[in-house]
Image (cartoon, helix red, strand yellow):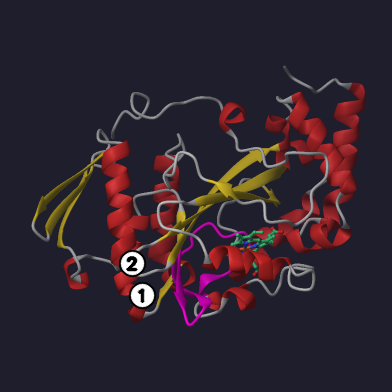
Amino acid sequence: MINNSKIISHSPLIERFPFPFKGDSYRYSNNSEALEPPFLLDITPEYFKEIEQKRHLLKTRKEQCYQSFSHSLEGQWEILEMIINEMTSLYPNYFSLKKNKNHWTFCNHLLKEEQSFIFGNSSSLPYEPLDFIGRHIQEDLIYIAQRDGDLYMDAGQLCFPANWSIAFNLGMTYTEFHSPVPYFSDSGLAEKVRNFLLRIEAGKPWTRLNWTLTVEPILDTFPETFDEWGAKKEKVTSENAGQLVHLRVEDQRLFRLPRSNGILFSIHTHLISLDELRKNEEWINRFYRVLTDLPDYIAQYKGFISYKDKIISYLEKIIKTKEGVIK
Ligand code: HEM
């Protein structure tokens, strides 16, 4: 087993957590920003644990976690190349690539794994290219094809979904896969965001943070297993909310793929318990203000309306008495 203490920084979660709120109020908006530096990968101390979990899910529930159309293969190879280039240039101690024309050998030194293959020949890999490369990084990867002026979900490896399903969404257009989001379509925001996506340029990636709440630190909240994780919401009380309730933040990134003209949508999911979030007084106070100001339609869609009052009374206790605000 590799000694990861030497290679992956172990800064405390509270210092590296992507806190999503810029103000005291949250509404749906196009909160995308230019991605600086323009890279997809974020390797955190959770790398080994999450890769193991991803691979276990892919082994036991493949159809739930991975779906693709055969016409997505060209885009998939482009994604594999882009990600391997990034891996080897940003983290040369962790990953390397040897190329002899189209005979490539990829090495993951963290996992002590080596794979040789012929670039562009899918039968030379154990899995499809998107599925292969996704098994080496923490991010979920969705390939969106752009054709006839529209955007289609043509492939995806999605192991850590916030209650949506690649098996259900495969083949949908942008408008279709966003249709469950309340207000999004009716308000005209969906159309604005669609036009923004259609115009994303190669070399100018974007990022946005999305958030929700999850009971217990569960990354794989699939709709298909709702009966397992959804029932946990009933356990939340104002006494245990600090340990049970987790702020779940998705660091989403968008890249135009110049050869296929598709878009790569990556999702890196981070979880932090409210007890941990309390270590940052400004954040926990802001979270309280966001929650008390949040319209019901958003709390309903995000799935925490049934225990929102429990979280609020937990927050009021710790904020008013200040007993729990740890510096
Ligand atoms: C191609 C890129 C994108 C893909 C593949 C994508 C996909 C999705 C999916 C599958 C959902 C869940 C819908 C459900 O409940 O079944 C969702 C939710 C949502 N998306 Fe996107 N999306 C993309 C880009 C964006 C962008 C750029 C915005 C900017 C505003 C956005 C805004 C939202 C919002 C507000 C929600 C609701 C999330 C929540 O409240 O937790 N999406 N998206």
Which SS class for mark 2? helix
User: Which of 269 and 273 lies nearest the eye of the viewer?
Assistant: 269
Question: Does the magenta portion include 146?
Answer: yes
Residue toward you, 63 or 253: 253
- 76 and 212: which is toward the camera: 76
Whether residues under marks 1 and 2 lie with C-beta atoms below 8 angstroms apart, the answer is yes
Q: Taking the image as four quarters, which one is ligand 1 found in?
A: bottom right
Q: What label sits on residue 72 in the rendered view?
A: 1
Residue 86 position within the rendered picture, expressed as x and y whole percent measured from the top left: 32, 45
Bounds of the magenta span? 142-167
Residue wearing tag 2: 76
Badge 2 density bin: few <14, some 14–19, many ≥20, Cα 10 Å = many
Q: Total marks drawn?
A: 2
Q: Residue at x 87, y 59 (%)?
A: 296
Amino acid type, callout 2: Gln
Q: Residue furthest bottom?
A: 148
Q: Is residue 29 visible?
A: yes
Amino acid of disc 1:
Ser
Query: Within the magenta stretch, is there residue 270?
Result: no
Q: Residues within 10 Å of mark 1 (few under 14, many from 20)?
A: some
- In which quarter of the view is residue 317 placed? top right
Please tell me in which quadrant of the rendered image residue 93 appears. top left
Q: Residue furthest top?
A: 327
